[in-house]
Image: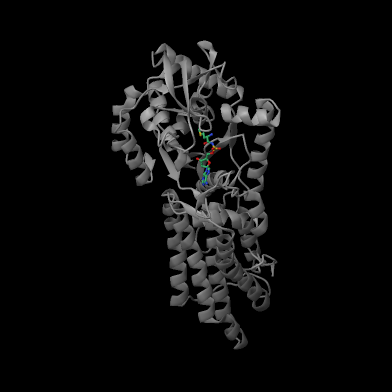
Amino acid sequence: MSGTPFYVTTPIYYVNDEPHLGHAYTTVLADVLARYARLWGRETFFLTGTDEHGWKVERAAQSHGVSPQEQADTMVVRFQESWERLRIAPDDFIRTTEPRHRRVVQAVLQQLWEQDDIYQDDYTGWYCVPDERFWTEKDLVDGNCPDCGRPVEQLAERNYFFRMGRHQEWLIQTIQDNPNFIRPESRRNEVLGFLQQPLGDLCISRPVSRLNWGIPLPFDGEFVTYVWFDALLNYVTAPGYLQDDERFARLWPQALHLIGKDILITHCVYWPTMLHAAGLPLPRQIFAHGWWIVEEQKMSKSLGNVVKPLALAERVGVDAFRYFLLRDMTLGRDASFSEASLLQRYQADLANNLGNLHYRITNMTGRYCAGRVPAPGEPTPLETSLQARSEALIPSLREQVERLALNQGLAEVVELAAEVNRYLEQSAPWTLAKAGEAGRVATILYTAAEALRICALLLWPVMPERMATLWQQLGWQATERPGEGLRWGALQPGAAVSRGEPLFPRLEPAGEAA
Ligand code: MSP
């Protein structure tokens, strides 16, 4: 295992509703990054979970006629089952109602209270009920919530405040000194822009009389903790804060937080100042991705355009669905979702390119090489160049993944598969076989299979099931550490090649398998 561990998180999702495409995207992305890190032999910790306190959940429970805990217990299963079906395999799944988390939240609150980083005051503000956030008069846009555009309510009450404002200069300096702390650049600039205005203190309590469903403040039982203050701390609870010092010290500073652009300020302003006040190091990076837009609009229940990930995964297969999500979202930008684009991507990259290549190679090996991996002969410049391209792709893909430019990285792998398809066209082993040139046929089929096997390994984190089938059919067995196969020549001549069903059957426009 190479030195630094890889620790990746997703936002923890509210249990007021079922998972949708947006949740699935961030979670698939985290899963894929964790699988790449494992492929490269790094110690990996992938965390996801659910955000179970607060008004949203309390109200959802009320509308279903159940207790908030029952609401959470029912909905958490929906998330866990969905992730399992999408082949998302977190190392830990945190629920904010767990005792381990409650302990951490209360300990941090107590510490900040004793340090005078928390004080009590009267507060009058504009409250956005769905977002659970207070806004000042000047924040409002046309009298509505600046974040979601919905109406706000005026509320006056006694509350507790975190002295966030005192960390403003430090935060600006920290962001300026660490260009990679907030990515991409556009989001970093957005946060720096936000910090040009004076940073106020943060209301971190809710009176029990108004909201019951939360973690009680350890120093005043009449209040529960504001849901964001509670939720953000999940990222330190899971790697062992106040439970396992050694593990926490190893993992925590490596954290990569994947978030949607909608929760930029909570993660890039509230969270670092909370950590700073508590004397904890910052995460390594916060990366905000764009939104999936459906028919030019944000997905929302009221618009009736919420995309359910599992239905789509059934249509094209889980692996193809994962591939689509990563291939079609460009670093930090919004992506437009449509079923047509999903099917088009499936057809072009998977059915016609990768799947077709696999089908051709296994079939010809069956026909011309008695179903065994052939021993390659002397390479011509064609083979040397294909080998060089395959070898160059290995570090290049790693670099793209580390930059979180997955769509570019995947495009390069699929481009190599297309190149191998062209190589087969060009060298026409079927003609050579008829002409009795068995040696050339063996070299060509070995070269094509080896390049495809490398493609399959590089795509394995994205399509774990299909790619493992692919390389097995090509005659390669992964060891405990499949990453060891990331080199030219690991495919052993003589190994049995099987002619399976097409890996990505072509779809008719109407969606029926061909
Ligand atoms: N509970 C908070 C997060 C707390 S993290 C300490 C929350 N939960 S949420 O259930 O509303 O999920 C928000 C996340 O879902 C977004 O940040 C984003 O990751 C994802 N998405 C929600 N809608 C999305 C799209 N339309 N497109 C892409 N992702 C979006 O906020």
Left or right: residue 510 compared with residue 237: right
Residue 381 position within the rendered picture, expressed as x and y whole percent measured from the top left: 43, 76
Q: Is residue 362 visible?
A: yes
Given residues 226 and 288, the one toward you in this image is 226
Q: Is residue 309 above or below residue 17?
A: below
Q: Is residue 477 visible?
A: no
Residue 361 location, quadrant: bottom right
Q: Give the residue drawn at x 40%, y 36%.
A: 141
Q: Give the residue drawn at x 47%, y 56%.
A: 407
Given residues 451 and 409, the one toward you in this image is 409
Given residues 122 and 356, the one toward you in this image is 122
Residue 262 position within the rendered picture, expressed as x and y whole percent measured from the top left: 46, 40
Left or right: residue 509 compared with residue 114: right
* The furthest residue to the bottom: 435
Residue 400 location, quadrant: bottom left
Residue 426 position within the rendered picture, expressed as x and y whole percent measured from the top left: 50, 80
Q: Is residue 88 above or below residue 280?
A: below
Scheme by which the image is coloured: one colour
Quadrant for the C terminus in the image: bottom right
Residue 6 position within the rendered picture, expressed as x and y whole percent measured from the top left: 48, 40
Q: Is residue 372 above or below residue 288?
A: below
Given residues 149 and 24, the one toward you in this image is 149
Q: Give the residue drawn at x 44%, y 66%.
A: 389
